Image (cartoon, rainbow, N blue to C red):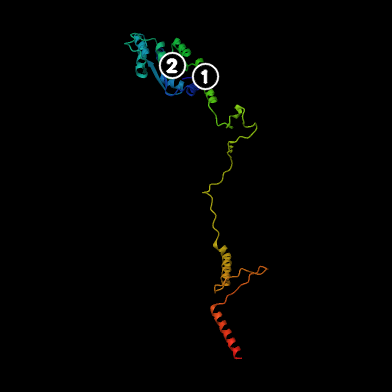
Amino acid sequence: MPRAKRSKQYKRLMNKYEMNFGFREPYQVLGDSQFLEAAIRSKMDIDHILKATLHGSTKLLITQCSMRWLYARRNEPGIGAVIDFAKESVERRRCGHHPSDYPEPLEELECIHSVVDPSKTGVNKHRYVCAINDEQLRYSLRNGIQVVPLLYIRRSVLIMEPASSTTVKARSRDEKAKFTAELKSPGGKRKRQQEDTGDDDGGDGTKEGAEPTNPEKKKTKKTYGPKAPNPMSIKKKKPEHKAQHTGKDQTETAEAAELEEAKPDDGTQLDTAGDATGRKRRRKHKSKTAAATGKDDDIQVETSVGDE
């Protein structure tokens, strides 16, 4: 188990690999034959120690060429236990170096290089974490391929190397590329768009200090503070009682009744022509019965005068 201080450093380093280069769990740990041999000789619980060191789930892998090198050394003491552990607990990574094409197993340096960087562009394409105890192979991976986390066992302790110079350069280059991409990307709309191209040709153009013809509407700032209450939670006002309006209604009905009484029953109309003071006088027309009685009185008067 790594100590607390070293464990924090490893966790911080793996977070950088995740944030900047896209490493994800389960981490693919590609080991060589010497790494497995050192783990078995030290009697280490390699799966548990890998999880504690990388702070995440892991998957231990070994190439076909590394297994062939172990089989070639099967008569050496302690190699049989390494072969049994590799058969049971380690997943086989196909490297494409078949025995029919390669009667002798390929060197682990070349084999692991071809697996980590298949296109030979100096990039860890599949994001392997390499557990390598061969110093020459570890040196070539550190300086030849970018972004390769390296592990090795020393004195029964699993150690993780800090980020290499190539990894630091790759991270700074990616950050600069993101920054320049943001600068090159067009921002919002221009505040002032020239409708006429007369300024370039010496023709009529907008004068300096003149207001643009189509100024953009100013964005209203969002105001913060107490908001209006929910209209659903407000108690509605009670309607006023009808008794308050009874007195007014009675006066209105009385005035209407007086107007009705003022109107004549015989269909006479009010005379709109008044005197100089503006008064209106009422003109009444006699009814048919009154006119007939008036005529009879006139006839009687005439007859009485004739008799005299």
Q: Is residue 131 left or right of residue 172?
A: left
Quadrant of the rendered image containing residue 77: top left
- In space, the residues marked 2 and 1 are separated at their CA atoms by 23 Å
Depth check: give the residue in front, 114 or 281.
Answer: 281
The image position of residue 135, as x and y in percent, is: 45, 10
In the picture, residue 305 is in which quadrant?
bottom right
Q: Nearer the viewer, residue 89 or 219?
A: 219
Q: Is residue 45 visible?
A: no
| Quarter of the rendering occupied by the C terminus | bottom right
Give the vertical position of 263 relative to 41 (above or below).
below
* Disc 1 target residue: 173
N-terminal label among 2 and 1: 2
Which residue is at the far left?
100
Report whether residue 65 is seen.
yes
Disc 2 is placed on an element classified as: strand
Label 2 Cα neighbours within 10 Å, binned few <14 / some 14-19 / many ≥20 = many
Q: Residue furthest right?
A: 277
Q: Secondary structure at mark 1?
A: helix
Query: What percent of the width, then of the height, locates residue 19?
Result: 49, 24
The disc labelled 1 sits on which kind of residue? Arg
The residue sitting at 39% across, 18% down in the picture is 61
Q: Where residue 78 appears, x then y in whole percent? A: 37, 11
Mark 2 or 1: in front is: 1
Q: Tag 1: Cα neighbours inside 10 Å, few (<14), some, or many (≥20)?
A: few
Give yes or no for contact between labels 2 and 1 (Cβ–Cβ under 8 Å). no
Which residue is located at x 41 percent, y 17 percent? 30
- Residue type pointed to by label 2: Cys
In the image, taking residue 32 as reference, residue 288 lies left or right, namely right
> Which residue is tagged 2?
130
Q: Which mark is residue 251?
A: none
* Position of 4 relative to 275 (above/below): above
